[in-house]
Image (spheres, helix red, strand yellow):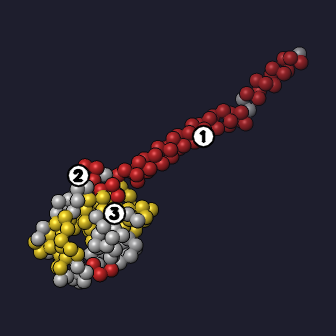
């Protein structure tokens, strides 16, 4: 009889609200938690892949690209495009500072491999032709001797010519392709200044 009562009590406990709660609610909750964990892991992996290889957000730091870009503006930078093709003249790029690769610079591509570049009397000559630069406000005060851009490199300058550390100076010089991080595509913040970039 004791055994019968024990079995009866066990049978009763299997149908108790607590057991039913554990069996059905907790198991479904466990499945839901597992689904959420999978979704979070997938999202983190996708975010890493996107940030590492496709696009990244940047904040402009400093006045060197004025008037085109203002300090503290937010940009979308395409990190994939230069895996498909080489940089082109006039594009705005982000690259690692050659003297300190932990720092990123943003400048405009002025000349590409094989081009000649010269700055004389405030005028920029690309392949011995005067370069029309409607994106700058002040003429360049510095001169730069006639030089040819070597293979695998580009010559860059900031649009704010007289307040920019760029290829005119030895600290930057010709920028090798392997230091280029991507092409600035869009200003998205502040919203009032949102625009696409060349």
Say what secondary structure mark 1 lies in.
helix
Residue at mark 1: 29
Q: Nearer the viewer, mark 2 or mark 1?
A: 2
Q: Earlier in the sequence, mark 1 or mark 3?
A: 1
In the rendered image, the quadrant that contains the N terminus is top right
Residue at numbered disc 2: 85
Estimate the spatial distance between the alpha carbons at disc 3 and disc 2, rounded to whole Å: 16 Å
Q: Residue at x 10, y 72 (%)?
A: 129
Left or right placement of residue 179 versus residue 154 in this view = right
Which residue carries the number 3 mark? 94
Q: Earlier in the sequence, mark 3 or mark 2?
A: 2
Residue at point 77%, 27% (across, down): 12
Left or right: residue 130 versus residue 198 is left
Position of 26 relative to 60 (above/below): above
Whether 56 is drawn above or below 73: the answer is: above
Tell me where residue 8 appears, x and y as whole percent.
80, 22
Identify which residue is drawn at 54% across, 43% down: 37
- The image quadrant of residue 169 is bottom left
As helix, strand or loop, the secondary structure at mark 2 comes to: loop
The image quarter in which residue 167 lies? bottom left
- Residue at 31% across, 52% down: 80
């Amino acid at each position: 009889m004791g055994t019968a009562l024990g079995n009866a009590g066990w049978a009763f406990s299997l149908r108790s609200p607590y057991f039913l709660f554990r069996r059905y609610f907790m198991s479904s909750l466990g499945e839901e938690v597992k689904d959420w964990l999978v979704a979070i892991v997938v999202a983190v992996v996708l975010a890493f892949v996107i940030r590492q290889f496709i696009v990244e957000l940047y904040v402009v730091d400093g006045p060197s690209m004025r008037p085109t870009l203002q300090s503290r503006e937010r940009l979308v930078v395409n990190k994939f495009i230069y895996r498909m093709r080489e940089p082109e003249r006039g594009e705005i790029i982000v690259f690692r500072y050659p003297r300190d690769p932990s720092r990123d610079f943003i400048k405009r591509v002025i000349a590409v491999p094989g081009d000649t570049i010269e700055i004389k009397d405030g005028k920029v000559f690309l392949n011995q032709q005067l370069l029309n630069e409607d994106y700058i406000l002040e003429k360049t005060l510095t001169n730069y001797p006639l030089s040819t851009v070597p293979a695998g490199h580009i010559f860059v300058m900031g649009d704010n010519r007289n307040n920019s550390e760029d290829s005119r100076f030895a600290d930057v010089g010709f920028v090798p392709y392997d230091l280029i991080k991507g092409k600035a595509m869009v200003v998205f913040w502040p919203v009032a200044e949102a625009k696409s970039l060349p």
